[in-house]
Image (spheres, rainbow, N blue to C red):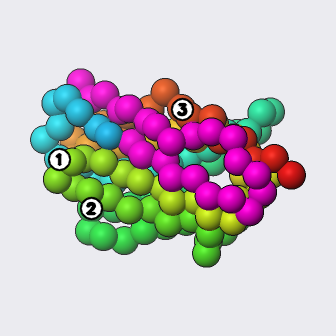
């Protein structure tokens, strides 16, 4: 079993920054990908950014140039640096991990609220 612990959400004014962290622990033998998704009220969960083990990253068009995903493989931790935040970035952000056994795990979610 894998546990994901997220931190770093909160309330920020438009134009501000936040950094999310997600630490994975438990029966981890290898990780294929780590990433972040978000879900706004009344909306479907959507991809924000992912980091593949080979080093490639993928971002939603709406966050390109503003958000940066990074990983500390030694700590099984993924980060999401969010700059120039907009009110439309307000959502619950979920950490996602896909192990080498192709099992998928989700964090409990952390609220990000951007005021105008």
Would residue 10 be counted in the magenta stretch? Answer: yes
Q: Measure how far apart labels 1 and 2 are at the Cα level.
A: 9 Å
The one of 26 and 79 positioned closer to us in this rendering: 79
When asked about the image quadrant of residue 109, the answer is: top right
Residue 79 is situated, as x and y percent measured from the top left of the image, at 41, 53
Q: Answer with mark 2 or mark 3, whichever residue precedes in sequence.
A: 2
Secondary structure under tag 1 reads loop
Secondary structure under tag 2 reads loop
Looking at the rendered image, the quarter that the N terminus falls into is: top left
Q: Nearer the viewer, mark 2 or mark 3?
A: 3
The residue segment tinted magenta is 1-22
Chief secondary structure of the magenta portion: strand
Q: Residue 82, can we see it? A: yes
* Pointer 3 residue: 109
The label number, if any, that marks residue 30 in the structure image: 1
Are the residues tagged 1 and 2 within 8 Å (C-beta)? Answer: yes
Say left or right for 2 vs 94: left
Would residue 43 be counted in the magenta stretch? Answer: no
The label number, if any, that marks residue 53 in the structure image: 2
Q: Residue at x 62, y 64 (%)?
A: 83
Q: Residue 106, can we see it? A: no
When asked about the image quadrant of residue 54, the answer is: bottom left
Q: Residue at x 77, y 33 (%)?
A: 41
Q: Measure how far apart labels 2 and 3 are at the Cα level.
A: 23 Å
Q: Measure how far apart labels 3 and 1 are at the Cα level.
A: 22 Å
Q: Residues within 10 Å of mark 2 (few under 14, many from 20)?
A: some
Q: Residue at x 70, y 48 (%)?
A: 12
Residue 70 is situated, as x and y percent measured from the top left of the image, at 38, 62
Q: Residue at x 42, y 46 (%)?
A: 21
């Amino acid at each position: 079993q894998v546990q994901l612990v997220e931190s770093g959400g909160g309330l920020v004014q438009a134009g501000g920054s936040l950094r999310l962290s997600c630490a994975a622990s438990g029966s981890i033998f290898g990780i294929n990908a780590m990433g972040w998704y978000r879900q706004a009220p009344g909306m479907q969960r959507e991809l924000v950014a992912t980091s593949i083990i080979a080093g490639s990253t993928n971002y939603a068009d709406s966050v390109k140039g503003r958000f940066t995903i990074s990983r500390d493989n030694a700590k099984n931790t993924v980060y999401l640096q969010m700059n120039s935040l907009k009110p439309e970035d307000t959502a619950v952000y979920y950490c996602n991990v896909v192990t080498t056994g192709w099992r998928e795990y989700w964090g409990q979610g952390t609220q990000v609220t951007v005021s105008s």
